[in-house]
Image: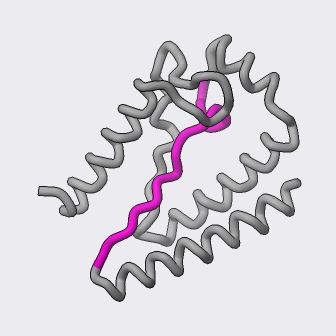
Amino acid sequence: MKRYARKTSRETIVAAEEAVSWAETRRADVLFVLQPNLLTLRSRDAWDARILSSTAKDLLVMLESAYASYRDWSSHSHSVVIATDLFDLESPSPYMGDWAHVNTRGNQLIADFVFDELKARGVLG
């Protein structure tokens, strides 16, 4: 599973870099946001633990491996930002029922993060 995750994350990164190159030829910016998921939380409440316990272990292994590849990519690409710790201090959990889908509050936190990042980059007035 780890090998498969590394392979598919490399393919995703190659495709994303192609998108960045394409956008640059049109004088456009691209921003990829590595969003939080239950595996990136530093601490989990009972709800989070229950969701994780019902998630396929192979999926968890794949996610951890893929996120490691994406974090590495972010260290040398100006088009990637890391938001994986965004939900660390949130209580109650912003997750709705699985490892990735968030509630309204989670979506608001992600939107605010993206807005702030775009503003800091001078993309927004």
In reply to whether residue 74 is colored magenta, the answer given is no
Task: Name the magenta segment's main secondary structure.
Answer: loop
Residue 6, percent across and down? 77, 63
Relative to the observer, which residue lies in front, 43 or 118?
Answer: 118
For this rendering, which residue is in front, 125 or 91? 125
Q: List x then y, in percent, for residue 125.
A: 11, 56
Q: In screen coordinates, is 123 left or right of 11? A: left
The answer to whether residue 105 is left or right of residue 40 is left
Give the magenta part as a residue range.
28-43
The picture quadrant where one finds residue 15 is bottom right
> At 36% from the left edge and 32% from the top edge, which residue is drawn?
108
- Asked which quadrant contains residue 51, the reply is top right
Work out whether 67 lies above or below 31: above
Q: Residue at x 52, y 45 (%)?
A: 35
- Residue projecting furthest to the bottom: 25
Q: Residue furthest left?
A: 125
Q: Magenta stretch containing residue 38, yes or no? A: yes
Indicate the position of residue 62 as horizontal and vertical percent values.
79, 50
Examine the rendered structure and indicate whether residue 28 appears above or below residue 94.
Answer: below
State the image coordinates of residue 106 (x, y, percent, origin top left): 45, 29
User: Considering depth in this image, is 67 or 29 the residue closer to the camera?
Assistant: 29
User: Which residue lies at the image location 34% right of the left edge and 48% below the top edge?
Assistant: 114
Quadrant holding the N terminus: bottom right
Q: Is residue 16 left or right of residue 45?
A: left
Q: Quadrant of residue 98?
A: top right
Q: In the displayed structure, would residue 35 be above or below residue 7?
A: above
Residue at the spot x=51%, y=63% of the render?
74
